[in-house]
Image: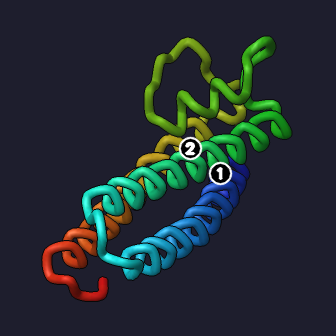
Amino acid sequence: MLRQLLLGGAVSLGNIAIHAAVMATVVGTARRALEWERRRPQLRLAAVMVATVGVLMIAHLAEVMVWSLAYGILDVAPPGADPRYFAFVNYTTLGYGDVVPVERWRLLGPMAAMNGALLFGWSTAVIFEVLRQAMRSRDHGDRP
């Protein structure tokens, strides 16, 4: 069990590092974009929000692939199962239950789900922050 917790923790921390780098980049880029000329604020708001959510989706895809890689290396998914599918189902907490990990790695699925739930929540907070900055910039003409 300790081995599962350590390896799952290491993968989770790797994903948290990826997410932290992306979050810092997204927030900084959004701030700079919101300082551009103030014409067509609705279009600018839409562009910033679409870009923000798009980048976050790419980050989540990369994080699922990290879990998939770990599952493949550790041989977590049962024979014949696709580790990418297994990683998506766990990370998104979808929980179909059609693929279950091999007995010796059964804690990695819930750890991936916990990691995904945490990072989705973090993404939601960043989306809200970018929207808050954009609305403040639009409504008050202030810098974000």
- Give percent across and percent down for residue 16: 58, 64
- Give percent across and percent down for residue 45: 31, 61
Residue assigned mark 1: 8
Above or below residue 127? Residue 34 is below
For mark 2, give the secondary structure: helix
N-terminal label among 2 and 1 = 1
Q: Are marks 2 and 1 in contact (CB under 8 Å)?
A: yes
Question: Colour scheme of this structure image?
Answer: rainbow
For mark 1, give the secondary structure: helix
Is residue 1 visible in the rendered image? The answer is no
* Residue beneath the point at 70% across and 29% down: 84
Q: Residues within 10 Å of mark 2 (few under 14, many from 20)?
A: many
Q: At label 1, which amino acid type do we have?
A: Gly
Q: CA distance from mark 2 to mark 1?
A: 7 Å
Asked which quadrant contains residue 89, the reply is: top right
Residue assigned mark 2: 112
